[in-house]
Structure formats: C-alpha cells, structure tokens
Image (spheres, coloured by chain):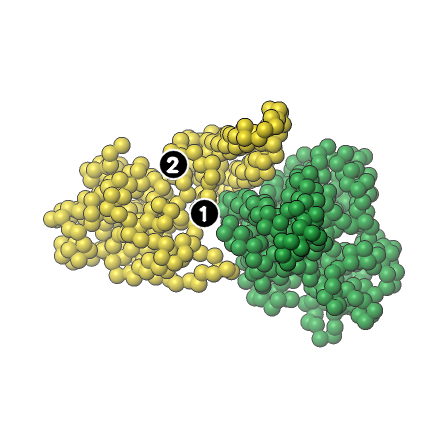
Chain colours: A yellow, B green
Amino acid sequence: MSGYSKEQLLARLQELNINFASYDHPAVLTVEAQAKYVGHLGGALSKNLFLKDKKHRFYVISALSGTNVDLKVLSQRLGLGKGGLRMAPEEALQEILQVSLGCVTPFALINESARSVSLLLDQGFKAHESCFFHPLSNEMTISVNTRDLDKFLISIGRNPAYVDLEATPLVGKDQPPDLASLVPSETPSLVGAPEKVVQNQAPDGNHAPAEKKGINKSKAAAKEKTTGSAKKFVAATDVGKLIDEIINKTCASVLIEVNKDSEDQSKVSLGHLLEKVSQKIGPDLESIAMSFKNAAYIEGFHAGLHSVIDRGIQGLSSPR
Amino acid sequence: MASEDGQKAGGAGGENEGAEEMVVNPWEVAVKGGGKIDYDKLIEKFGCQRLDSSLVRRVERLTSRPAHVFLRRGVFFAHRDLEEILDLYERGEKFYLYTGRGPSSEALHLGHLVPFMFTKYLQDAFKVPLVIQLTDDEKCMWKNLSVEECKRLARENAKDIIACGFDITKTFIFSDFDYVGGAFYENMVRVSKCVTFNKVVGIFGFTPEDHIGKISFPPVQAVPSFPSSFPHLFSGNDNLRCLIPCAIDQDPYFRMTRDVAPRIGYQKPALIESSFFPALQGETGKMSASDPNSAIYVTDSAKDIKNKVNRYAFSGGRDSIELHRKYGANLEVDIPIKYLGFFLEDDDELEHIKTEYGAGRMLTGEVKKRLIEVLSEMVERHCKARAAVTDEMVDAFMAVRPLPNMFS
C-alpha cells in the first residue's frame, strides 16, 4: 500500500476534529531552515530522528529542537546496550515511514508500513501550547497541541509515550532499562483502546474477550523473542495471536521430531513421536495460555471496577 | 521445651550454639567448618517427617497426574502433617496453599523460583487457592532498606512470581505494608499474646540489641496460615486447613505457629519443605543474591547462562581425561548433575547421564552442555511470561477481591 499523502493526512485530522494551523513554505531539510519560516510564530519546533537498532527495529524520536538527545544514553535506557541505536538508512525512510529526507514526523506512523515503529515523544512538548511538525511533506509545517497529537495517535492505535529525553538514569543489574517497554515487538499494533473491549459480563464470568481482529503476522514467529514491550492489554489478549503461536510451536516441534526420527535408525511409532512433542512444548504452551487467561481476567477486572465507579459517580447503586 | 511437634530443645540457632554444628534459621544457613548440610540431622533436630516415596505415589494417585519433578527427586523432602492434608483431600474436603517471598532485591535467581514452581504445581494438581505473602516489612527491618524501596521491590518481585504461571482466578498476592490491618492484624495480636519474649529469642536467636520491629515480626509470617486472616476469601470457612510449601529454613516460623494454633482455636498449618538450592560454585549453603556468579538469574541471557555454567559451575569431573575415564565423576559434589536433578524432567535421561558420567564415559563438557540447554529453555520461558506481566496485572493479583471459583 503506498504511503499517505499530505492531503490525506490533513483530511484525516479534520475528520478527527483536530485543530491545526498550516504554513506553506519552500522545502526545508533542517530545523534551522524550517525555523526561518515558522520560528517566529510562537510554537515549539521539533526535531525528528528516525533510528534503528541492531535487530532491525525502528524508532522515531520526536523532540523539542532544543532538547539534547544522546543516542548512547537512549540506547541503554531502551535496553539495547551501548551504541545500539543509529540513524536509519535512507531506504528505510522510504520503505517504512514513506516520507522523504528531512521529513521525519510522528504523523508518518499513519502508514501501515510503520506499524511496528516505536514512537518516543519528548515530554517537553506538553509544556507548549502548540508544536510544529511536518505533515508528511517538508513543504509545509502544521502546528498542533499535544492533546490533539495524542488524539491522532490513539486513532491510529498507538499509545502516546512521552519520555524525559534528557534524563540519564542508571542502568545496571538492579536498575532495569526504564524505556525497555518502548522497544517494538514483532507484532503490529492493533486498533482499539482497552476500554472499548466488548465483554460478556456473565455472573460467574471469567470469559475471554470477544474475538478481536487478528492481524496476520508477516512472519511465523516460531522463535519469538519478546523484549518487554508486550505491555499492551490488546496484544496480550489477542486470540488470533495466541492460536498462531500455538500452531507454529506445535508444527515446528513436530517437524523437529520427525526429522530426528528419520535420522535415527530405530523408527519410533507416531504415538511415541507425538508424545515427545507434547512433552517438549507442553510447558511452553501452558505458560502462554496462562498469560492469556490472566490478561483476559485483568481486562474484565478493570472493566468491572470502572463500571462500578461509573455507577457510583452517576449516583446509582452497585449492580447486584 | 519439647513441643508436640517433637522438636528437640535448642531451637535452630538460638540456644546451645556450641553443641550445634549447623545454623539453620530464616536469616542464616551455615555449617560450622564449611561442610555440607546434613538433612537427616536437620529433620531430626526440627522434628518434622521425611517425605518418602509412598507419600509421593499417594500424591500421584490422588491428583491423577505424575508427581512434580521436585517430588520425584526428593527436592521437597520433609513435611509436617502432609498425610492429614491428603486424608482430608481424599474425603473431598479442601485446603489452601500459602507461600511467600522476602523481596530484598530485584535480581531473582533460580533458587528463588523453586518454591514457586512447586507451589504452582500444587495449585494445578489439587485445584486449590493460594495466598502469596510479600514480606516487604521484614526486608525493611532486616536489610535496612527504605519503606518505599521495599514496596517497590515487592511489586517487582510480584511480576516474576506471576510469571511462574499462577492462575489469577485462584491466587491472592499481598504485601505486608498494604494488607496488614483488619482481621489479619487481629490474628497477629492473638498469636503475639501466646508467644513470650523468651520463646521468640529461643526460636529465632534474637538479642536485646535487636530492635523491637524484628522481635515482633514473626506473627506477621504466622497468621496467613489461618483462613480468618483473609475474610474476603475464606469467610465462614474457619476450619479450612493450610499447606505451606517452603524451604526448610522457614520451619521455625511455623513451629511457632503450630504451637500457638490450638491455643487460639485454630487448625495447625501443614508444611512441605525443600532442601536448599546449591550455589553454582558448590554446596556451601544458600545462594547469595549479592554474588552474581553464584547463581543463574532469571534475567540472564543464553550467553550469560552458557558462560556461568561453563566457568563457575563446580564440577565433579576429574582433573584429566585419563583420570576421568578411569574413575568416573564424583556425582556427590558435581553441581551440573545436581542442577539437572532439579530441572531435567526426563527421569530416564537423568539416570543415563548419571550412569555414564559416573563411569567416566561421559565428560563434564557434555553434562554442562545439556544443563545449559535445559536452563536456557526455562529462563527463556520465564522471560517471555514476565514480559507479558503488566502493572495492571500486578494490581489485579493484589486486589482484595473474592475468588469465586477458587476450588474448581
């Protein structure tokens, strides 16, 4: 799917009732150049970096132009070790963010191709009434406030993550990397905030949530290495993802056992082979399923809690 | 002071230090002269029972599933009143589980996970509820950490505990700082009234220089054994028995509890106790969370595990290949064999390795390689489960909420 155009983005912002001011200017490739045209208008200029780590995961860091961004520190805070972050190559800019040079912007995440890019926003943005970003073109700058930026991000299924980019917390054995949760997992992010989950509130309920849209993964994750970013309710209770994992693990294990068997001279019965498979993957599958069960319960628990609070606020008594 | 439990006079580190070669209490495990812990002597001294194979088979029959590897290999080797629990279970009655952790550091190692892995098995096999106590107040008092830090550590440790796979519909996790009060505190006072200062000094080895927080702490760890401490879970079920899986160094708390229980009209808790998980460098007592090379941590990468096992795991192999092939390995002191005893599920494979290694036909490198595989798989599984644990999940596990299906 080809990338969104500036016009499509602006139309989307209007649909979302987001107020923005827009300023046309000649193409600019740097913040300094941009400042010449819009710097006097009172909003906060942003500098936007498109980075990648050694495991080919991508990040957009969007900061106030005056914020000092130390890639070495950020790399450690993300749990990528020292020197784990570098500027992404130009091809990645085209392929993933689908914008041109000098045009990196949080709004690029509207593209499907950018679905697994992690976005870090400077918490300094919140102190300004409006901030300047490129709307997928470096011939224009739009100014939005952070509330509206959040609205946009949530509408594309993102959880806005504001970070103190200048902080330098200690990272070591007893101090885990504080931004580790912002490292992308393999899975694309899904649409919908937790509160919108449809639940069947049965009286003795511990039900899994109604089936959500399972997005097909582009690669079978037989060897999934999560890095602490699976903190979204929605990903944790995705039935499609669960089934994919179970099927992939089982198939992979069966293949391994069959291959082992065909190498061995002594042929074993299918029953024996399957028993070995179930022994091998049993504990892993149980662990995955228990995580799923617990995550589903948590959603129900919070939904129940909020429904009681809401009823209280409305002056109604608790449901029996 | 011979109590009903047959415990010999002398406690476990309190009186008569000179006559005791071993010190085993919740804050210290050591053998004078640096020898190995003699578990037979410990059972005798504490007055608990051996967990023999007939009991293991009975557990298998009652739960209709193979016994957990820790039971089969004698890791959990001692008990108090386990037979009574099995009797009542056979009659169709229920019980609940109680275990805990003192959250003194964020770095959890495999030794810390042992009681939790076993407790999860018990929860699944018997289909019973579980309460998990995080003694953040204890660590605040003993380790001189701030209250805030202990509360934070308790929550962090809760995440690793949850990652062991406990069922949220049957599990209540609580931290002392959050939960003490109400019915729980009422029981604490009832227990405190039954334990004299002299008694607690005798059991735990306190001195007049110890601050009063320490001296009054034991009831906090005692009262989760009583169902009335959890009115939101067990109200009306005052006779519900409690089974406590723990390491044997916690026995003093529960000796005290069992002594007090009948005097306040409560049931005695039953115990199922484990031996200590040996440090990587050998059997000198418990692992230490402050020496990173004494243990495999749940945060270790596959590379770390490989490195630690290869470099630091104490080997019973001989100094040269010739000697090794001639005499075989010393299985008594070999740490990789001991670790495989804990974590290698397949009994036949373990037997095979022990036979070959003991006869000198298998080399240390091969044993270590297998261990590295087993440990890496385990740690990876834990890591993955840990990554799925959110703060919201911790909040829910720790919420004071009813558990309507806790016995199903």
Extreme top residue here?
A270
- Residue at 67%, 55% (x, y): give it: B323
Q: Position of residue B252 (x, y in %)?
A: 77, 59
Q: Describe the element under mark 2 as helix, strand or loop.
A: loop
Q: Position of residue A133 (x, y in %)?
A: 23, 49
Looking at the picture, does residue B199 appear above or below residue B52?
A: below
Residue sitting farthest toward the bottom: B209
Q: Amino acid at mark 2?
A: Val
Q: Dot 1: what SS?
A: loop
- x then y, percent, for residue A205: 58, 33
Label 2: chain letter: A
> Where does label 2 land, which residue?
A191
Kindly indicate the quadrant of the structure image that contains residue A318. Answer: top right
Q: Which residue is found at the position 64% from the left and 43% from the top?
A: B344
For residue B318, above or below residue A194: below
Residue sitting nearer the eye, A10 or B90: B90
Image quadrant in which you'd find residue B209: bottom right
Q: Is residue B371 left or right of residue A101?
A: right
Residue position marked by numbered label 1 in the rendering: A227
Q: Is residue B22 above or below residue B162?
A: below
Tell me the quarter of the picture where residue B67 sits: top right
Q: Residue B246: give x, y in percent of width and height.
A: 71, 52
The one nearer the camera, A264 or B147, is A264
Estimate the spatial distance between the alpha carbons at disc 1 and disc 2, rounded to whole Å: 21 Å
Identify which residue, B116 or A105, lies in the foreground.
Answer: B116
Q: Quadrant of the C terminus of chain B?
A: top right
Amino acid at the residue labelled 1: Thr
Residue at position x 88%, y 60% from top?
B2
> Which quarter of the figure is the N terminus of chain B placed in?
bottom right
Residue B224, can we see it?
A: no
